Image (cartoon, helix red, strand yellow):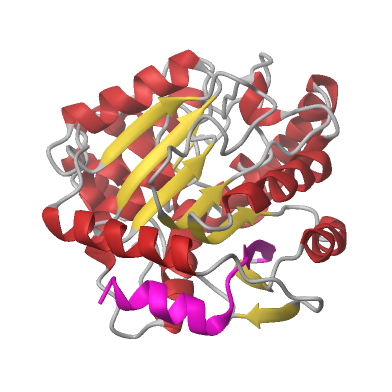
Amino acid sequence: MKPSKKNNRAIGHLKTMVQSKTMAQSSAMNVHTVTNQAGLHNKNKHHGRYDFVALMVALPELKPCVINNPRGEKSINFSDPLAVKLLNKALLAHHYKVTEWDIPKGYLCPPIPGRADYIHRAAELLSNESKSIKHTLVRALDIGVGANCIYPIIGVCDYGWQYVASDIDEVSVENANKIAANNERLQRHIECRLQHNGRHFFEGVIKAGEFYDITTCNPPFHKSLQEAEQGSQRKINNLNANKAKKGTLKNTLNRAAEPSKTSAPTLNFGGQKAELWCDGGEAEFIKNMALESKQFGNQVLWFTTLISKKENVKWMQKTLEKIGAVEMKIVEMSQGQKISRFVAWTFKTAPQRQKWLKLKS
């Protein structure tokens, strides 16, 4: 993925900014909570029920998996991993014109509506900083892209971002690069890099002279495989109960699929170790990410990460205060009854951010 001449000029200006002005330091970090209206972002393509007629046209393979739920509405069996994967393939083909997409057996099959909401809120974060920003000039970095490559796909298709993505799993990187290469909409927009050191996040991925406007990340949720299996089984039980009571809405997939990240036989949404769990779970993962981010505060405008457990937000805030972050935003998202959030932080003051984003106008 080669940057355009316009991007090269912007990179040159950013280098000058780094050389002439050191990273902002502040003794008091500004913290803002952004509470959004319930429901998906207004730019999200997945409002309302799935249009299974259109999805079957986009992907005829989906047709045998489509059933009628207890209310007589078209749906799929969300306990069937093949049906879930084919639904995702159909959604990507219909809404994003990404027709060549697949994941290896046992890898995470993400709930697309919730993933899309994160990208739209992240884009909104940049747009709120600069109303004149050209998103086609935005350079993004995804930490832990997974084999599904979902965040770069949505970022490229909906906003024209240039995306670098990383993962510690070789199969994930190989598959994500294959998806990017096999779809014309994604070519020259996505580059996936292998992170050789599992203890690092940005080191070994961000190269000298590279600058990113925003990073994205969906951290491993659990502390162990056993914990992941237990959590996943609970969600599957809840899914079956929901189906029996009121049929299946899009946000049911978000509620059921998100925590079901594991490869045990009863865990139907897939997932490898790096996608599902890590030592210390989400809290340890995001803390270490925050600590390492300080080294790259001159090369990244906004760092962001999803945080599933609300109690981890306060620990993240304490970590960011200790390392000298200038500003932190807690962006809340709501899909159905599920409340999720991502945290964004920066080491640059508002005037520095305005100067940076002026190059993207």
Name the residue located 59 percent from the left edge and 78 percent from the top edge.
349
176 vs 112, left or right, is left
Q: Position of residue 63 (x, y in %)?
A: 28, 33
**Which quadrant would the C terminus be assigned to in this image?**
bottom left
Q: Position of residue 194 (x, y in %)?
A: 46, 22
Q: Is residue 212 above or below residue 82?
A: below
Q: Is residue 249 visible?
A: no
7 vs 217, left or right, is left
64 vs 204, left or right, is left
Q: Is residue 279 above or below residue 20?
A: above
The quarter of the displayed image where residue 92 is located? top left
Viewer-proximal residue among 119 and 260:
119
Q: Which residues are magenta?
A: 337-361
Q: Is residue 39 above or below residue 229?
A: below
Name the residue located 57 percent from the left edge and 24 percent from the top edge.
270
Q: Is residue 11 above or below residue 144?
A: below
Q: Position of residue 103 (x, y in %)?
A: 40, 22
Q: Is residue 199 visible?
A: yes
User: In the image, is residue 231 part of the stretch drawn in magenta?
Assistant: no
Q: How many marks?
A: 0
Viewer-proximal residue among 217 and 25:
25
Name the residue located 38 percent from the left edge and 38 percent from the top edge.
88
Name the residue located 29 percent from the left edge and 39 percent from the top edge.
190
**Which quadrant would the N terminus be assigned to in this image?**
top left
Viewer-proximal residue among 333 and 300:
300
309 vs 325, left or right, is right
Viewer-proximal residue among 253 and 4:
4
Q: Position of residue 117 (x, y in %)?
A: 48, 62
The quarter of the displayed image where residue 274 is located? top right
